Image (cartoon, helix red, strand yellow):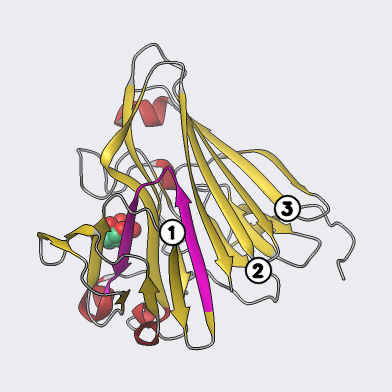
Amino acid sequence: MSSPVSQPQRIDFHGMPAIHLRAPDGAEAIVMEHGAHIVSWKPVGGVERLYLSPDAVFAKGKAIRGGVPVIFPQFGDRGPLQGHGFARNQVWEVVASRAGEDHAMAHLCLRDSDASRALWPHPFLLELTLSISGARLDIELECSNPGSEPISFMAALHTYLAVREVEQASLQGLHGQRYYDAVKKKDMRETGTELVIEEETDRVYFDTRNPLLLKEPHRALAIQSERLPDTVVWNPWVERSIKFSDFPDKGFRHMLCVEAATIEHPVQLAAQHSWWGRQTLMAL
Ligand code: TA6
């Protein structure tokens, strides 16, 4: 049975402002103003399905290790900006948050500012909307170009999924896909029907069309995206984990990033137009 509607609460999360959403069916999520960063998602049943590093740093201007970093306007080091761009390091504005009869949602935005224009001299309005209901999380990223010149950008929802033991998990749905292997530094094609992580993995699968299924011995997660055609699969494994000061040495065992992205073909956004992309997670 559903409980009475409880409206989103402003909370302090590791010393920073955040919003706690709770849907009437018991699904919960926490999103921070810093980066519009989703740091927790518990679908109905109450089990956390996002990985947040226990050593994550919560500080002005710093990226948070885990959850769902919003990557904009550059992916990784594929451009002149700081790695993964600046949107994840800036404070977003909460536009709306509410709970209805069968969901709860929050809508945050980030506009260009003196700080962003110093890095990337373009006007933009970036909006993130997350919505939870039952077993489902929808994350939608929208970018509008309020200026008079076209803009071009990459974007990703860099989702860190929680897994009980990464070597017992498998990712299905990438068979036959072309990808760039950033560890081996070469272009490859996926030959397996399921991907099992047994070494450092950092891949951009291009133009992925199928829904993905992350299977674990006792549970699964369906992952779908729309208008974010590339899928990044990342696990730092042993040696890279040790190099991160904000990540436990054995943290790689309990996470797998499955990211919905647009990297190969950056979005070309005409003046006065907007673009959106979405990632949906469904706990099974
Ligand atoms: O999405 C995979 C990736 O680009 C990896 O190459 C790895 O560096 C990871 O993101 C984390 O990047 P970050 O800047 O958050 O340390």
| Helix, strand or loop: magenta stretch | strand
| Ligand 1, image quadrant it occupies | bottom left
Which circle's residue, 1 or 3, is located before the other in the chain?
A: 1
Q: Amino acid at mark 1?
A: Ile
**Magenta span:** 220-236
Which circle's residue, 3 or 2, is located before the other in the chain?
A: 2
Counting from the top left corner in percent of width and height, residue 275 is at 45, 31
Residue linked to disc 3: 104
Residue linked to disc 1: 64
Considering every residue shown, the one lying at the far top of the view is 148
Using residue 122 as the reference point, say whether residue 217 is left or right of it: right
Any atom of ligand 1 within 8 Å of the CB at mark 2?
no
- Residue at coordinates 56% horizontally, 36% vertically from top-left? 109
Q: How would you rate the neighbour count of disc 2 (Cα within 10 Å): few for under 14, some for 14-19, many for 20 or more? A: many
Determine whether the residue tagged by mark 1 lies in a helix, strand or loop: loop
**Between 134 and 129, which is closer to the camera in this rendering?**
134
Using residue 239 as the reference point, say whether residue 55 is left or right of it: right
Quarter of the image holding residue 3? Answer: bottom right
Q: Amino acid at mark 3?
A: Ala
State which quarter of the image contains the C terminus.
Answer: bottom right
Q: Amino acid at mark 2?
A: Pro
Quarter of the image holding residue 53? Answer: bottom left
Mark seen at residue 43: 2
Labels 2 & 1 near each other (Cβ < 8 A): no
Using residue 24 as the reference point, say whether residue 82 is left or right of it: left
Mark seen at residue 136: none
Q: CA distance from mark 1 to mark 3?
A: 24 Å
